[in-house]
Amino acid sequence: MANRITIPNRFASKRTLSTSTTAVDSVFLPVRNAQPVVRTMSILPTHASDAQKVFIPKKAYRTIIANTALTAIATSILLKVDVAGGHVIKGHTLTANDFLLIQTSDGLALKAISAVADVSASLWCDVTIVATGKALAVGYPVWVVRAVDVWSYTSGGTARVTFADLLAGDPGCPIVVRSTSNGSNNCDVLTTVEYVEP
């Protein structure tokens, strides 16, 4: 059985309240080398189209940004690739269906990829995202969150639903919970994560 005694606060809960079609994210930061496990997620929707996503970054798909300076309005970033002139990162072919979890001056920001362009004879590919609104912290790891590592749920009604032991992340990696409402009502989500020491 995993020994959890040395993690003083092994449970963390966050409320994600979305009031519009603009997504609201709650980031569960990594705790040492502990594995984050979503123990419960309680969703109180007010519309059938209210939607939730859980993003599970994997340690295997971390890379770095090549740009030496990036401002809050930057939309083009260079990511380290496996083979020059391509867009394969740690064995995964990057697509516009993937996401990037980027360290900014105000914490981690999750951004969808809108375009991927190869750079001839270069070990970097050019990725287009929506501006983060915060300066990007160059030199920190960037997580490529593959489309297959995103859990999605659409309410389909207004009944409260609770999921137990929903997902487990990678040790030492964050988890992001994203909530979106239909635009005229609120969607309230309470997520509890346990950090389990390996």
Image (spheres, grey):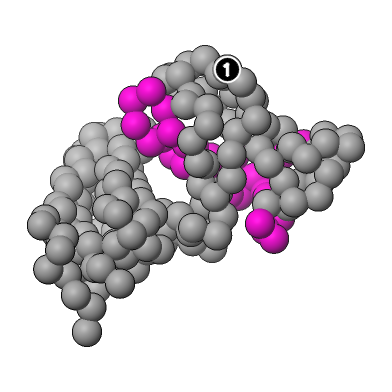
Q: Which quadrant of the rendered structure holds the C terminus?
A: bottom left
Q: Whole-percent x and y of residue 161?
A: 18, 65
Q: Which quadrant of the rendered structure holds the N terminus?
A: bottom left
Q: Is residue 192 visible?
A: yes
Q: Is residue 172 covered in magenta?
A: no
Q: Is residue 5 left or right of residue 123?
A: left
Residue at screen point 46% across, 19% down: 135
**169 or 148: which is nearer to us?**
169
**88 or 197: which is nearer to us?**
197
Q: Is 192 placed above or below 14 here? A: below
Residue at screen point 16% across, 60% down: 7
Q: Secondary structure at mark 1?
A: loop
Provide the residue span drawn in magenta: 90-117
Single out the residue that lies furthest toward the bottom: 1
Q: Whole-percent x and y of residue 114?
A: 63, 36
Q: Is residue 156 visible?
A: no
Residue at screen point 49% across, 35% down: 140
Q: Whole-percent x and y of residue 184?
A: 25, 34
Residue at screen point 44% across, 39% down: 110
Q: Is residue 179 left or right of residue 147?
A: left
Q: Is residue 104 covered in magenta?
A: yes
Q: Is residue 190 left or right of residue 29?
A: left
Residue linked to disc 1: 69
Single out the residue that lies furthest toward the right: 121
Q: Classify 10 Å Cα crowding around label 1: few (below 14), some (14-19), many (20 and above).
A: few
> Of helix, strand and loop, which mostly describes the magenta segment?
strand
Q: Whole-percent x and y of residue 186?
A: 19, 40
Q: Is 183 placed above or below 69 here? A: below
**59 or 94: which is nearer to us?**
59
Q: Which amino acid does the dot numbered 1 rest on?
A: Ala
